[in-house]
Amino acid sequence: ETGVTQSPTHLIKTRGQQVTLRCSSQSGHNTVSWYQQALGQGPQFIFQYYREEENGRGNFPPRFSGLQFPNYSSELNVNALELDDSALYLCASSPKGLLDTQYFGPGTRLTVL
Amino acid sequence: AQKVTQAQTEISVVEKEDVTLDCVYETRDTTYYLFWYKQPPSGELVFLIRRNSFDEQNEISGRYSWNFQKSTSSFNFTITASQVVDSAVYFCALSEAGGGTSYGKLTFGQGTILTVHP
């Protein structure tokens, strides 16, 4: 196990609702990244935080937003949910900054009906 | 832009067979990192290996070995004497370190589904 935890494990929402996913990074890891993995696809980068500041984002609309807290845990917020947002959301943490190996949590499975 | 291609969508083998998973990448950076991750049915991505672009030495870890060739932009992964527990989806990934907009972000291939039959 990597020590990265995510909650909740599963979530069902309806279109138009908002959702918050949480990630607790491994102790001492100062970088957290979020990825979206649609069924049968490889993970797609959403954004990355380093010491509480966003370090760039992938090709996702502004309704995807995030935070990193002083203890390096993180949240991913998605507003105005769409059916295509149904996916596995993976959080990864790195111990030594942006280029270090990313260790993944178990993910949150989001279903949008 | 960086890109990772895993041409093999699915591979099926019988236990004890050797199997090689192919990975081809594209990047304009001279400094980058390559990774392999394993995703069992539980969903969690398990880190297997990381190599930097300046280290082309092949690596062996137990039944796993990796062949990195910059000349062909490939980073292939071989499992020797496969076991049923090796059944999973395997992802190759690339992270650029040249300071561009993709700095530090992982770009994944589509994954290869490996099924090892008893």
Image (cartoon, coloured by chain):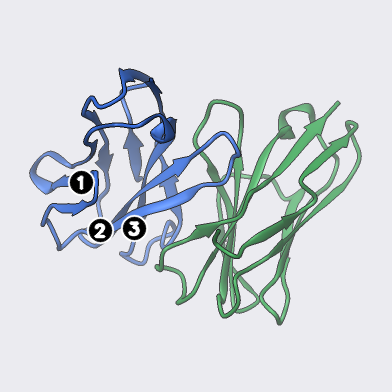
Residue shown at 91% from the left, 40% from the top: A17
Name the kind of residue labelled 2 in the image.
Arg
Name the kind of residue labelled 1 in the image.
Trp
Residue A63 percent coordinates (x, y): 77, 48
Q: Along the polypeptide, which appears first: circle 1 or circle 2?
A: 2
Q: Give the SS element for disc 2.
A: strand
The quadrant of the image that shows the C terminus of chain A is top right
Answer whether labels 1 and 2 touch (C-beta < 8 Å): yes
Residue B44 percent coordinates (x, y): 57, 46
Report the chain holding disc 2.
B
- Shade of chain B as shown in the rendered figure: blue
Q: Are marks 1 and 2 on the same chain?
A: yes
Report the chain holding disc 1.
B
B80 and B45: which is toward the camera = B80
Specify the label residue A64 is tagged with.
Answer: none
Residue B111 in view here:
no
Which residue is label 1 attached to? Answer: B66
Q: Is residue B68 left or right of residue A3?
A: left
Which residue is label 3 attached to? Answer: B96
Q: Residues within 10 Å of mark 3 (few under 14, many from 20)?
A: many
Q: Give the SS element for disc 3.
A: strand
Name the kind of residue labelled 3 in the image.
Glu
Residue B25 percent coordinates (x, y): 27, 41
